[in-house]
Amino acid sequence: MKKILVFIFLFNIGFSSISCLSAQDSYWVFFTDKEDVVFDPYEYFDTKAIERRIKNDVPINHPTDWPLNETYVNTVSSIVDSISGHTRWFNALAVLASEEQIEQLRNLYFVKQIESMDYYSVLASKKGCDRTFEYYNQRRRQLDILGRKDFEDGGFNGKGIRIAIFDGGFPGVNTSPAFEQIRNSNRLIDTWDFTKNKDFVFYSISHGTEVMSNIGGLIIRGNDTAQYGLATGAEFLLAKTEIKREPYSEEKNWLMAVEWADKNGADIINSSLGYTKDRYFRSDMDGQKSLVTRAGNMAARKGILVVNAAGNDGENIWNIIGAPADADSVLTVGGIDPSNDCHISFSSYGPTADGRMKPNVCAFGSTIVANPDGYEINVQGTSFASPLIAGFAACALQANPNMKTMELFLLIEQSGHLYPYYDYAHGYGIPQAKYIITKQKGNVQKTFEAEFNGNMGNENLMIKILNFTTPSIGESSLMYIKYIKIDGTIGSYQIIQVSQKKFAMRLYDTIEDDNMIKVVIFYDGYIQEINL
Amino acid sequence: MKKISILVIIVFCSIYTAHSQELLLYRWVPSDSVKGNWGQNLSHWMHFYGAFGFVTPINQNVGSEIYFGKASNWELGLRYKKRITNWVAIGGNISYDFFNYRIEQNTNKTMPDTLFYDKQKILLHNFSLSPYIRFNFGRRGNKIGNYLDLGIFYNIVLGSAEKQRNTPDGLDRVKNKNLPYITHDYYGFYANIGIGRWVIYGKYNYSAVIIGNPIYNDIAPLTIGLQIGFF
């Protein structure tokens, strides 16, 4: 009997310690309606937000932008321990409450739904650099590969475009020479720390500073100019939404920040984070499940281009993109390796759980940034590919000022160097400024010939490169090959570095799969399809 | 011979041409790539784990008291989990479970003898089987999360030994193997409180470990320690 009592005592300790952990929790409390609220969009929105709505045919006075019903808020406030935020778009309050309080809330006639809101890990991270690059060359290449000169010649530097950055901290943005020209021309429009509800964001981790430098960082020292991003003329809104580099944060901050960015007239949002296994399953990455994914789509519907990092899970079990990168209206950016212009190993793969292509485009996943002290460092992560594309998008929007957001989204996809070819590692490839300006890809010339050769079960794909020249050191000559299944999706894909004029590839593994119906090959702008 | 030579050259050339292009990336995209059955919070999950803990003096008997802080437990095992719902799972462990019972040298001591030594310990090498039921707490995705395991264990004693040091008869070290007063098998209960890979465990021997001599009291039954999952 004594033994049993000791055992029960031990189990009680276990139960009570766990129940202590979960005694109070964060929840979203969704309301049924917004009755009797007063809303003046001209008072609430920044002028740029109004202009963006007009351009994108988005209603200026829309219920999703109305404030929450004050009576509802006060009633909930009197029941719960505290209110930590709200979302107008989804008509919900973020509260800290016990289970008993939540039960009370469920009985309120205006409460539609209550969702638990745990803490989730995010991907606003960078990996340590394990290689030595020539910073100067790489800094130029990370922009040149996107067509820096074409934007420069056209006078496009993101001027007049407002970019919101969601990140973990921005130390040095108020002092670093990399942002001096932004500060001097008053282009740092607003800041807000959603983790502490204050406007000072120039502290904590330097991730946001480095991300911002890949959008609009510029250091001018005498005759030397160091440019880190394409949108050196853009305006900025800085939102601190994360707590630390590999943080446990809340979707709540992201959601509130996106509404704040909308209110303050953001044209583009750069978000280098993703919510993955801590809350979700891979099958949840269907563009519907997570609240931030829905918020990403909602932002797009309100005319904001959301640019999001694909994530750094390419080498992990998770492997695929996270939320909100799975949203169909979010421009998801994958990373490529500067040493060969091919997918960088850690960049998360597509497709989404429902089979949609992701990422949409790609950029360098290892970049040169200006740190808070204004010194150059090499960083790795799709967190830094995303701001390169956000800067690109700002220039693209400046070049096409009347273009609606989703038209711009498609234009950026179409400007990809692989377009219309795509795969689940690169999307449509690296966006090209030239196409953004001219809307033309130039004449497509046949660059190779491919045909089958061999016996059944041992087929070879014979490829002959036309006008072959041996690539110089540092020059890549990549061939993209994908196998299409009967349902139109990609069954497998590969990238090879071409170093010979003629070569053969064995295909028997692929052909044995009856679902594969054709092979599509991309090389140097030319695409050939061969039915299997 | 000529034909064979030509064939060798053709094969060599074909291999050379087929493999001289550098493959930078190859991805197979199976249709069920996002589902799968194996995962921390999917249908099946399995991982190795290691544990270290201390045998506690709680509920121990006079005459076979252990030296708290020196009586320890090591365990290396393989854990399987079968998800029933998001909140409940069942599973089992197979493990090698080692106990080092350092015996307190005091005047009450009767097990395994009444003599005094500088050090005296009883070692148990067990093969352990331990099914459990798991209760998870908090929302999560494909993560182990926070949990409580309640289970029973059945230990088969693979070997036992008693070690003495600085014995009264002048011998420095003595080792007695296959102790007759140690049971062949025993069982008990256990509980794990886990947060991710980290686990605090407690296991309690319900049946006797020390048998075969009426004057021997059983050894301290409760062990508490820390476990880490390798995943």
Image: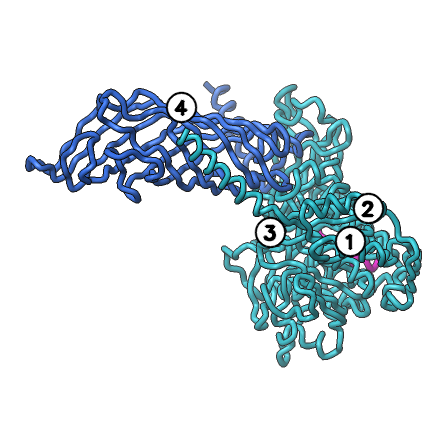
Chain colours: A cyan, B blue
Marks 3, 1 in one chain: yes
Q: Nearer the viewer, mark 2 or mark 4?
A: 2
Alpha-carbon neighbours of circle 3 within 10 Å: few (<14), some, or many (≥20)? Answer: some
Residue B207: in sight, yes or no? yes
Task: Where is residue A495? Give x, y as percent.
Answer: 63, 41
Q: Is residue A345 above or below residue A204?
A: above
Alpha-carbon neighbours of circle 4 within 10 Å: few (<14), some, or many (≥20)? Answer: some
Q: Amino acid at mark 2?
A: Leu
Q: Is residue A436 magenta?
A: yes
Q: Chain of mark 2?
A: A
Q: Amino acid at mark 3?
A: Asp
Numbered badge on residue B154: 4
| Distance CA(mark 4)–CA(mark 3) | 53 Å
Alpha-carbon neighbours of circle 1 within 10 Å: few (<14), some, or many (≥20)? Answer: many
Q: Nearer the viewer, mark 4 or mark 1?
A: 1
Numbered badge on residue A337: 3
Which numbered disc flags the more N-terminal residue, 3 or 1?
Answer: 1
